[in-house]
Image: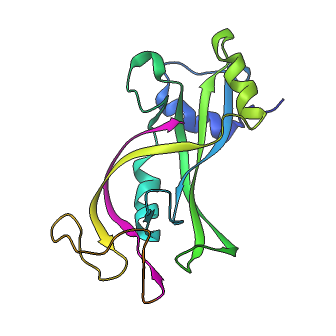
Amino acid sequence: RTGVPTAEELELIGRYTRRELAPEEVYTFPVVLCDNEIDRDGERFSIPALEGLAELFVGKTGIFDHEAKGKNQTARIYRCQVERDQGRTTAAAEVYHCLRAGAYLLRTPGNEELIQEIDGGIKKEVSVGCAVGRSVCSICGADRRKAPCSHRPGERYEGKLCHVILEEPTDAYEWSFV
């Protein structure tokens, strides 16, 4: 059956439950949280930032639309790691890296439709809520929080695309289906 956890996964999931769950009670699925590709806001995570986030996101809750209400808590991350795709290059000319998590939710009547949407590829994209210590201009290296520069994300300077590099993660709050 799709999404049935292995014994190893159940052990990891057990860190967050109040009782031991049977495999048939749990649905597991992979989710790409973020990556080092430049996003629509003109930002990307550095590879070291992704590595730091891999530790910070374990145990964090998945919600809907970044609304941190109890009723919106849907899933939880039980493992997370950075994956490298040697065959793919980002717009910033780096080898593509992503933060891939293993998430779980309970198989309940209320979650049946969500499980079908995840399996069918409908619920796939997520957004993350986190804090970083530095937001660096890709053109001049300025920390845009401490010493804003005049470079504008999305514009080219001497052929180089300006974007903001998010570095030094300090916290991970949640991830959200969007």
Which contiguous range is marked in magenta? 159-178
Residue 162 falls within the magenta-colored stretch: yes
Q: How is the image coloured?
A: rainbow
- In the displayed orientation, state which residue is furthest to the left: 146
Point out the image quarter for the C terminus: top right
- In the displayed orientation, state which residue is furthest to the right: 1
Figure label count: 0
**x, y percent for residue 97:** 58, 67
Give the left or right position of residue 59, taking residue 75 as reference. left
Point out the image quarter for the N terminus: top right
Up the image or down, 177 lies above or below 162; here it is: above
Q: Residue at x 40, y 27 (%)?
A: 67
User: Which image quadrant is residue 153 in?
Assistant: bottom left
- The secondary structure that most of the magenta stretch takes on is strand
Give the left or right position of residue 152, taking residue 103 as reference. left
Name the one closer to the observer, 29 or 142.
Answer: 142
Residue 145 falls within the magenta-colored stretch: no
Name the one closer to the observer, 133 or 139.
Answer: 139
Q: Residue at x 48, y 87 (%)?
A: 159
Q: Residue at x 49, y 44 (%)?
A: 127
Up the image or down, 45 lies above or below 150; here it is: above
Give the left or right position of residue 106, taking residue 136 as reference. right
**x, y percent for residue 47:** 47, 70
**x, y percent for residue 101:** 58, 47
**x, y percent for residue 145:** 20, 63
User: Which image quadrant is residue 45 in?
Assistant: bottom left
- In the displayed orientation, state which residue is furthest to the top: 109
Name the one closer to the observer, 164 or 59.
Answer: 164
Q: Residue at x 52, y 39 (%)?
A: 77
